[in-house]
Image (spheres, rainbow, N blue to C red):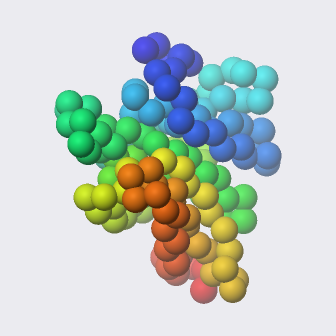
Amino acid sequence: TKEGEFNIVHGVAFDTHRRQVFVADRENGRIQVFRTDGELVAVWPSEFVTPSARMNRERPWPAHLSAVAYSGFFDLLFSIEGSTVVTRRPDSGTVVKSWEWLKEDGWPHDIDLGVNAKEPVLMVAELDSKQVRQFQLDLSWLGYR
């Protein structure tokens, strides 16, 4: 699929400061970035997605870029790319940190970032396990305590 087009849109996040929209282009394994007027700004292919995993009907998500979530407080974009949670700079797409955490069960479907007792919490909705997993994030590597 050409840049600016999609093969299953699977998540959208909005950065009000930059007036940009981040789109999880699931089957193409990339994040596409648009201005709010619809102009394509950038395409960030994932290095964490395994296209050959599409053939595995029991565990297809390693081939998917499943979801995106933007945190204006931390000015970071979080995504689920294959079996990896990825943190990117929203102005460049540069990968800042990644965590491989997903187990055999689950099938990640959506992601969001919240705050629990003043600490960042990553929440991932999973299809197969029919649950939302919550992960306390240690962002001390960014200078946050």
Residue 70 vertical position relative to residue 102 in the rendered view, above or below: above
Of residues 7 and 75, which is closer to you in this image? 7
Residue 4 position by quadrant: top right
12 left or right, relative to 86: right
User: Is residue 130 shown above or below 23?
Assistant: below
> Can you give x and y, in whole percent of width and height, for residue 61 in the image?
33, 43
Quadrant showing the C terminus: bottom right
Inspect this view and state whether residue 12 appears.
Answer: yes
Above/below status of 33 relative to 133: above
Q: Which residue is at the far top?
A: 2
Residue 88 visible somewhere in the drawing = no
Residue at horizontal 24%, vertical 42%?
Answer: 58
Q: Nearer the viewer, residue 113 or 38?
A: 113
Q: Position of residue 11 (x, y in %)?
A: 58, 39
Which of the image's four quarters has the N terminus? top left
Q: Does 18 appear above or below 2?
A: below
Q: Residue at x 34, y 65 (%)?
A: 101
Q: Residue at x 40, y 59 (%)?
A: 129
Q: Quadrant of residue 62?
A: top left
Horizontal relation, residue 72 to residue 125: left or right: right
Relative depth, front residue between 61 and 19? 61
The number of discs equals 0
Instruction: Give the x, y percent position of residue 99.
Output: 36, 64
Left or right, 17 with reference to 83: right
Residue at (57, 79) in percent of width and height: 143
**x%, y% of residue 16?**
79, 46
